[in-house]
Image (cartoon, rainbow, N blue to C red):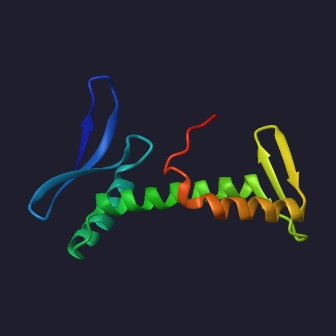
Amino acid sequence: MYIEIDPSGGKWWRLKYRFNGKEKRISLGVYPDVSLAMARKKRDAFRTLIRKGIDPSQRIKEEKAAQRAEETRQLAASRFKLESDGGLTLQLRNRCLALTPVETMELRSFLDATRPELPKEMPCL
């Protein structure tokens, strides 16, 4: 464990380690936001993962990906609300569109029918 000082003045706690024969390093936090005691606790936690055969940097990447997926899901959940009567409400920026239950079923049928034809990435209009 060491502290890396950037020429611009930034300071980071870093941990160098080897995993599967490769040297890697990981940030433990920004100094002084992360104290020496906190950096040591993080170091010990990462060492425990390494002993168990888990790459800490890969674990962090997976956790961040899961967090982004959850944020995306929550954003979608806040934009689209299925009402108890079967209607659908869409919130797009400052506009709100409310579909009746019949319109919702028609939209669902349309989306199901066209699903295989949709490109993987839809361009934003």
Residue occupying the far left of the picture: 21
Against 110, residue 25 (above or below) is above
**Image location (x, y in percent) of residue 52:** 24, 76
Residue at x-position 54% and y-position 55%:
117
**Image location (x, y in percent) of residue 53:** 22, 74
| Viewer can see residue 43 | no
Residue occupying the far top of the picture: 8
Q: Pick the residue in front: 4 or 35.
A: 4
Q: Pick the residue in front: 42 or 125.
A: 125
**Image location (x, y in percent) of residue 97:** 85, 47
Residue at x-position 88% and y-position 52%:
98
Q: Pick the residue in front: 4 or 99.
A: 99
| Viewer can see residue 13 | yes
Residue at x-position 73% and y-position 64%:
109
**Image location (x, y in percent) of residue 64:** 45, 56
Q: Pick the residue in front: 74 or 104.
A: 104
Q: Quadrant of the C terminus?
A: top right
Residue 41: name its quadrant. Answer: bottom left
Residue at x-position 39% and y-position 56%:
38
